[in-house]
Every structure is written in C-alpha cells, then in structure tokens.
Image (cartoon, coloured by chain):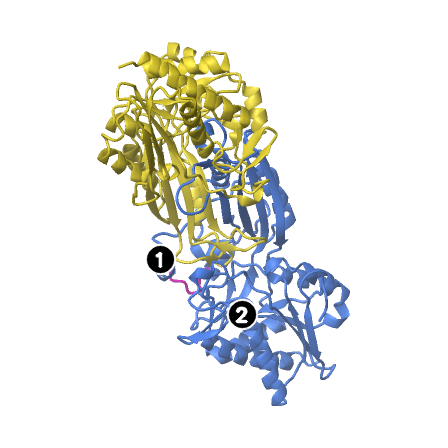
Chain colours: A yellow, B blue
Amino acid sequence: MYETGGHPIVYGEKLIDKNLPTVLVYGHYDVQPPDPLELWESPPFEPVIKDEKIYARGSSDDKGQMYMHVKAFEALNKTGELSCNVKFMIEGEEEVGSDGLEGFVKENKDMLSADVILISDTSILANDSPSITVGLRGLSYLEVEVTGPNKDLHSGTFGGAVANPINTLSRMIASLHDESGRVTIPGFYDKVKNYDQAARNEMAKAPFDLEKFKKNLQINEVWGEAGFTTRERIGIRPTLDVNGIWGGYTGEGAKTVLPSKAHAKISMRLVPDQNSDEITAMFEKYFKSIAPDSVKVKVMAHHGGEAAVVSTTSPASLAASKAFEKSFGKKPVPSYEGGSIPIVALFQQELQIDPILMGFGLDDDAIHSPNEHFGLFNFYIGIETITYFYQFFSESNQK
Amino acid sequence: MYETGGHPIVYGEKLIDKNLPTVLVYGHYDVQPPDPLELWESPPFEPVIKDEKIYARGSSDDKGQMYMHVKAFEALNKTGELSCNVKFMIEGEEEVGSDGLEGFVKENKDMLSADVILISDTSILANDSPSITVGLRGLSYLEVEVTGPNKDLHSGTFGGAVANPINTLSRMIASLHDESGRVTIPGFYDKVKNYDQAARNEMAKAPFDLEKFKKNLQINEVWGEAGFTTRERIGIRPTLDVNGIWGGYTGEGAKTVLPSKAHAKISMRLVPDQNSDEITAMFEKYFKSIAPDSVKVKVMAHHGGEAAVVSTTSPASLAASKAFEKSFGKKPVPSYEGGSIPIVALFQQELQIDPILMGFGLDDDAIHSPNEHFGLFNFYIGIETITYFYQFFSESNQK
C-alpha cells in the first residue's frame, strides 16, 4: 500500500526471470457515486448475478475488469504457465482525476518499469465484434456558480425586475453551442486533430447500428455536431456537456422563489491535440465574458486530463490482436472510445510505455449509472484473452 | 375548524349588531418551506426579536400580519370600542393555491357575507411611505421534465452523440425570453392591460430609489422588459421566472454523467386581464413545440390564480386611506404589487366584495427566503391602523 494525499495505491509484483518481458497491469478500485440510489434494482454494493450479468457498482468500471487480471494471473501461476514478469498497480482515485498517481509514478519509475502496460477499463463494440481501444478522449471538468441578488427573493415582489440566476445560467449554457451543435468557445477547435476521409472510412468499418443505438436509449433522434457520424462524434470530436445543474426550490410542490444562486457542473471531452489546461482557461474566460452585468459568475476547475492515441503496430498491440482473435475467433478492430483515462497520457509521458487498452465491457453496461453490470461472458472471455496475451507477448518479446 | 381536502380553515365571528357594518378578515397560517435551512441565522420556527424585528418563517407572510388583526380585535373588544361585526377566516393553503378555499367560500356565502374583506398580506413602500395595495399579479406555476436517454449515461461513452437533457432544457428556457426581456410564448401579451402615460405618471409618483434597490440586493444592474421602469416591471407587467432547476449530479466533486432527465419549476406572474388557465395552456403548447426530437417533454401544471385590481374610491378604500393617514401622519399612495393573492379574485367573484389590501410588511422582509422578519414598528402601527379603520369604516357605513 502506497499512501498518497487521497486513497492509497496498491502495488504488487512477481518477477520470475529478468530475461522475460514485464507486464504492468493498471486498474482502479474506486468507483463513481451510486446516486441516484432509488433507481437501483439491487443494492449497488451487494453484487447480484442476474440474466448472466453481475450487477454492482464497479462491476464493469473497473473492479470487475481488474479482477479478470487477478484471476488470469492466478491461473497462469497455478498451472506454471506464467511467461512474463507481472506488476500490479491499482489506484483509488481514477474517477476523481488520479491526483495521487502522478507523484507515485514519477517517484517510482524504476519499480514500475515494464515492457507494456495492460489496462482493462474500456469496452468492446459487441460480444460478437471484438475491438481494441486505440483512442481515448481527454477531459476538462468545471463547476460554475451564477449569483443574482444576494438572497433568495419572492418571485412576485421582485420577479421581472431582477435577473433570475437560473434563467441567466440557462441562457449562458444555451450559448455554449451553436445551431450546428458546435461548441462556441473561441479557439476550442483550434488544435483538434482532423482525420482525412481515408482514416474516417477506416473508422466507419467498425460495426455500428444506429437504429439499435437509438432503441437501446429509447430516443427518437441522436444529436451532435453537424457533419459527423455518431461514432465520430463520440470517438474523434470534442464535446461540452452539463453533468449537473441545480438552483432554487427543488422539493415537492411549488415555491415562488427567485433564487440568489444557480450552479452547474460542466465538462468537455477533448481529443488530440487539445490541451486540457488550455481548454479549461478558454472556458473560464469565455463563460465570464458572456455573463450579463446583472449577475456575478464564479468558475472553478475540477480535474482534467489529456486525450490519447495508442499505436496499432507495436509488438504488444499485435500480441493483443492475436489474443483477441484466438479467444473470440474473430480479428478485433481498432476503436476510438469517447471516455477518458487521463493516466494513459501520463504513462506515455513519464514511463515511455504505450499501454494496451484491452477492455471487455460493453457500452450498455450502465457504468456511472444505476444498475451497472458486467456480462459473465465478458468476464470469462476477458480472463481467457489476458492469458493468451501473456503467451503471445512473451513469444514476441524474448530478450 | 372547517375541514377541507387539505389543511382546515379556521373561522370565528363576533356579531354585535346587525345595523353595524361587517368586516371579514382573511389571512393564512401556512407558510413557505423554510429551505435552504443552512442560511437561517436563527431557527425558522423559533421567533427571535433582534434589531427591532421579529425573525421567523411567517413573521411577515402571513402569521405576524394576521396576528395584528387578532390584537386589534382584542383591544377594541376589551375597551368596548368595537364598532363593526367581525368575521375571521384563516386558511392553511394560501402558499399552495388555496385549493380548499374555493369550495368553502361557495358553500358558506351567507356565513361569510360582509361589507368589506380586510387582508394584511402585502407591503407598504417604506416605513415613511405608507401605501395601500391596489393591484396584484396573478400566477401560473408549472413543472417541466425533459427526458433524453432512458438512463443516466457515461458522458464520455455517449457525450456529443446523444442530446443532453440539461443542455436541451437550458436552450428551451433561454428561448422563453427574447433579447428585450419579453416572454416569447405566442399570445402571452394579447390580453395584458395597457396603462396610458397619465396612469404611468401617476404610478411613478410612488417613491422609489433604484440605487438603493440595487444596493440592497447587491446587484450591479437590474434586468427586465425593455421600455418599462423597475416598478412597472414588478407592478403592471407579466413575467416568467424559473423557480427551481435540477438534473444530473449535484453532489460534491465531479461525476461525468450524461443524465437521463432534467427538471424545472417555472412560474409566470400575470397581470389584468390575462387568464391563468389560458396562460398555462399557452405555456404547455409552446414549451412542447420548442422541444427538439431528441428529447421528450412533460409539462405539469401546479396552481394558478388571477391578477386583481382594487377600487380606490369605495367607502372602505377611503376609510383605509384615512386610517393610514392618522397612524402614519401621511396620506398613503396606491401601489401595484408584484405578488399574487389569488383569493382576492375569488372573493370579488363569489362574494361580490372588494377586499382592502392593507398590508404592513416591507419588500425586504425576506418573505419566502431565509431570515424572514417583520418590523416591530410595522407590527404595532398595523394594529393601530386596523383599529382606526374599524372606526372610520363604521362611521361611513351606518346602516
């Protein structure tokens, strides 16, 4: 256990032969808050198996996926087939910006040295469409506070004559996108990596069923930046979403208040080569610039992280592809995921090691939502694939 | 005690002589919720006297003001100077639409018959500027729910490709006002009573200090419908305010959720001759019409009430004016208040009695807010003025 300013980092290693390649496995034991609790069909922290799925907070993100590595290691160890040195590093702050990890990595570069980092914290396209994640989005997360009058007012006695901070915040949020779904912050798209048509055609080969996507979410229409497909909007384009909003009276019934304050949590998903600190600063500057004189605005930055792109031609990447092909009986396709694993960029920068993102979840695992689950199929095939990876990686990496 | 579907109505009467005029006193014992509790400097339901003011929820709206009538009646009764028959009707649902009152009034017209209805649930302009309220705004209060995907989603895995209900609700709220601060709902202004310049000049005579108004609220600028003064915006123009908004993650820290739902409580203050049912229907139709296909919208009506205008030349009105002049040493001016007392229109319609709105609060009593208070000066001068009213009204009304 390595203490940090927050939750400690768990580290363990088994070094069997310095001539064999070394695999560093990274995962996280912290999870998103389980709210809203009332929507869970079983308690979030009491795992239940139902319909061939494990239901629990963290079952897919990321305790369940981390546990595949533990079981794969256990199996290889028991049967004497372990063909790599193995290091495990499991952190507890991934969902809140991995604050303690950067220092730990910088201070323990020798201990953490490895030939590949294995991370299972992503998804495959479908159980019959194996994929390996090669792109991840970055993140800039902020909180804003809009203050109108210095106290809550009676909406009759003052309404119509004093700026309402909720109405004002709504207008400000509305103006963060234009009619074509593009973010209006000046400079936001300046460093966005553009993909040529050939690259976009390649991405379009990954199977995707728009009607099924809409049906799963029970939506009539998708929404997003004009000129891009749904998968491109998720994989290679930056976004701006309000993750939470609150202000005024939110209880039962009617309270005729003109509130003093309104708040929102707003995050942007970033793509190469946007820089999260730059984007955070741009947001703050722009958001303050669009505030009318009738209100005061505070902007507070939460955490950020950079987007990452992983090589598809490294020995580790080829070994991973071979492992997927053996377990799934089908060659995996490269996929660009919309989520963020900020530590990928950190590992690339500090340890000079490319990670392999071999996740086995599905996009409808409801991670970060009530009733998160992880398929038993995915759990077992994950363990199997990991053991093949050790084998193929070791074969391709004899020192 | 008269039971209703909700909180009971308290009724009492003292009929001393059928040749004397009869005064019906109306008030309410229910109060607004005390939230947010953490902003109260003393417990909301334990009255405290500080700096010559009574601090408690309901001290001004309306328990404290109702209690002035009890004390005035008690004094007149004790000294043998009661010169009118008196009826008290105190309800418990004024803050939530007075649902039980309409039936009670309709079923008890004889019992409630009177020559005037006295209501102290409004304000004076200032302690050195006595005023009698002659205009009140109506109200239409609704709640809206915007649903995007059928469950909370990970904002990385789906963000940018699925409509975010908070962003969408913000855009919809933003589009309810135009650049000049006017409500955009088609037909909203059709029935709004217009005042000619002479009437507006008359209203402008009521003392009002814009700089003090801004300073009290710690705002740099007021906001409202272009072409109208602050007092006109409050007194004679209709409004639309969001009273509460909520959706997504609102706890500490960061949760990267793309929520399924976003909610808002929205109310409109109405003026003569807008009709609250019509406005509610217009809002619902328009709000649904501006929803994009990517979300589903529900609109639920809470309560409504009509605006009211009170005669300034009736015997009761003249007696009230005389009473104020005697207690304050200054002739009161007529004032148009922004709040709503929906039962005023009900009394006018069902009992054919014009009410006298002789409230003694101040606009900065923080009614509906934390630290609601009522000045001792106001409490005592209210009692005094009420006793004068009985005297003058009785003198002008000998049957």
Q: Viewer-proximal residue, A221 or A58?
A: A58
Residue B5 vs residue B352, the one in the foreground: B5
Judge if badges 1 and 2 mark residues of a common chain. yes
The local secondary structure at tag 1 comes to loop
**Residue A166 shows which numbered tag?**
none
Which residue in the protein does label 2 denote? B359
- Taking the magenta stretch, the answer to whether it contains residue A374 is no
Q: Residues within 10 Å of mark 1 (few under 14, many from 20)?
A: some
Asked whether B206 falls inside the magenta stretch, the response is yes
Chain holding disc 1? B
Amino acid type indicated by mark 2: Gly
Is A18 placed left or right of B294 in the picture?
Answer: left
Q: Residue A370, relative to residue A119: is it above or below?
A: below
Magenta region: B204-210
According to the picture, the residue beneath numbered tag 1 turns out to be B218
Camera-side residue of B367 and A375: A375
Q: Quadrant of the N terminus of chain B?
A: bottom right
Q: Is any part of residue B127 visible from this angle? A: yes
The quadrant the C terminus of chain B occupies is bottom right
Q: Residue at x 39, y 44 (%)?
A: B253
User: Nearer the viewer's eye, disc 1 or disc 2?
Assistant: 1
x and y percentages locating residue B209 in the rendered image: 38, 62
The answer to whether A394 is drawn above or below residue A140 in the figure is above
Using a 10 Å C-alpha cutoff, classify the residue at mark 2 as few (fewer than 14 neighbours), some (14 to 19) or many (20 or more).
many
Hey, which quadrant is residue A340 in on the image?
top left
